[in-house]
Image (cartoon, rainbow, N blue to C red):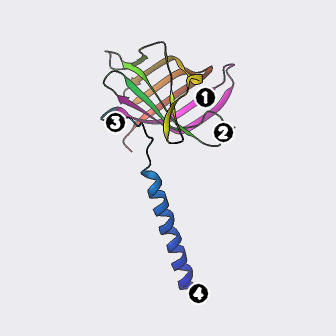
Amino acid sequence: MKHSFFTWALCLVCAAAGFTACSDDEKPENEITISTTYGKYVGEYGAYLSDGTLSKDGKAQVMRVIKGEKSDTLYMDQIRFTDKVHYAFDIRFDGIKLLQDGKTLKLEAETSVPEMVWKGVWSPMPQYTISAFSGRFSADSLYLDFKCGENILTYAGKYSTK
C-alpha cells in the first residue's frame, strides 16, 4: 500500500513538471529579441488612483530596462495594479532614453502607449498611455515615477542578478 502511494505521488509530480515545462516555452507572438539590458531590478511599487488613493502596493516586483536601437523599453513583469483583478500582467512600453549623464531616464515624446500580453500577443493599451515619466539609476538602484492613464505608479528597486 505504501509503495503504490509513493508511485502515484511520483507520477503526479512528474506530470506536473511536464505540464509546467510546456508553458515555459510559450512566448508572445511578437516578442522583442533582447540583446542588451541595463539590468533587472527587484523592488517595491505603489499604484495610486488619480485622487492619490493607494490602489495596490507590491513587493518583489521585477522591472527590466532593455536597451534598444532607437529607444529603450521598460518591462514590468507580472504586475498588478489593484486587488480587484486576481491576475497579473506582463506590460512593456518603449520610447525611453538614457540621458548622457548615465543616470536619468526620460520619455522621448510626452507619452508612450504601453502593451500588455493578451491571449499570447503583445497588444496596445491606449487607455493606459504613459505620461509624466521620470526615472533614474542610482548606484545599484532604479527609481521610477509615471502616470499610467490617470493613475500614478512609483517604483524603487535594487539591481538583481537572479
Q: Is residue 89 left or right of residue 139?
A: right
- Rendered image: mark on residue 97: none
Give the mark, 2 or 3, whose residue is nearer the N terminus: 3
Few, some or many residues within 10 Å of mark 2 (<14, 14–19, 20+): few
Q: Amino acid at mark 1?
A: Ala
Q: Amino acid at mark 3?
A: Ile
Q: Which residues are magenta?
A: 38-67
Whole-percent x, y for residue 117 in the image: 51, 37
Rendered position, 3 above or below 79: below
Determine which residue is flagged by label 3: 34
State the count of labels: 4
Determine which residue is flagged by label 4: 1
Label 1 residue SS: strand
Give the mark, 3 or 4, whose residue is nearer the N terminus: 4
Q: CA distance from mark 2 to mark 3?
A: 29 Å
Determine which residue is flagged by label 2: 85
Q: Amino acid at mark 4?
A: Met
